[in-house]
Amino acid sequence: MLNRSLAICVFSCLFCLSLIAQEKENTIITPKKEVVTDSLVVISKPIDALAPAKAAFYSAVLPGLGQAYNKQYWKIPIVYGALGAGIYFYTSNNKEYNRYRDAYKSRLAGFKNDEFYFDVNGNQLQEPRVTTDGLQRGQKFYRRNKDLSLLITVGIYALNIIDANVGAHLMQYNINENLSLVPHYYLNNIDGKGNTGLTLNFNF
């Protein structure tokens, strides 16, 4: 009799607990109307993958145009100044090389009427101001400087293209404070509870 009463009590307690559990499961969880979002996260501008290629192409077509595309206008005078200096030295050395070469060819032909046989007033001299060996050395000197000036000018032109390409890359590189640890808060759609945490982002 005692065992039967005890069994009825235990069964009654279990039945009540099951009803309470079902009531909790049937309760609809309604999320809060206002969810506090993280105000520290700033959505960055979309990255244009073709921007570096465009900047390099523009600088290849017209030096300095890529820098203008990147809105780095202060670099344009530097580009044209460097290119202008290279072209100036190339032209100057080429002119001097042609002078010495023409005089040397005239000497080989047996003439004595090249410009080095005359003084600054146009009077002909018995002995030239520059000897034939000096003309050969002058040709080598100015030809070497002419070739060097051409290489430097081409190098500056290439650097102009590289600078525009790298500048476009760096303009899209995100260097704000959000790249480190950022706290965040979001609403869990399953249980309707808010979760907090930290986000660590790496961009390669």
Image (cartoon, rainbow, N blue to C red):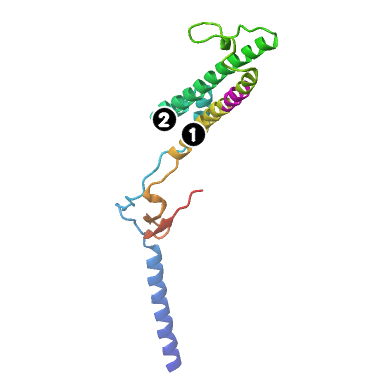
- Using the image as rendered, state which of residue 186 and residue 16 is in the foreground: 186
**Residue type at tag 1:** Asp
Which residue sits furthest bottom?
2
Query: Residue 42 shows which numbered tag?
Result: none
Residue 1 appears in the rendering: no
In magenta segment, residue 42? no
In magenta segment, residue 142? yes
Distance of label 2 from label 1 (alpha carbons) = 10 Å
Residue pointed to by mark 1? 163
The x and y percentages for residue 195 are 38, 60
Judge from the rendering whether residue 196 lies leftward or rightward of residue 112; answer left or right: left
The prevailing secondary structure element of the residues shown in magenta is helix
Q: Secondary structure at mark 1?
A: helix
Quadrant placement of the N terminus = bottom left
Residue 174 appears in the rendering: yes
Query: Residue 75 shows which numbered tag?
Result: 2
Q: Is residue 51 above or below residue 177?
A: above
| Quadrant position of residue 31 | bottom left
Judge from the rendering whether residue 165 lies leftward or rightward of residue 40; answer left or right: right
**Residue type at tag 2:** Lys
The x and y percentages for residue 45 are 41, 39
What residue is shown at x 39% (from left), y 63% (from top)? 26
Magenta part of the chain: 139-148
- Using the image as rendered, state which of residue 8 and residue 140 is in the foreground: 140
Q: Secondary structure at mark 2?
A: helix
CB atoms of marks 2 and 1 within 8 Å: yes
Judge from the rendering whether residue 53 lies leftward or rightward of residue 136; answer left or right: left
What residue is shown at x 49% (from left), y 10% (from top)? 120
What residue is shown at x 44% (from left), y 29% (from top)? 67
The x and y percentages for residue 162 are 52, 33
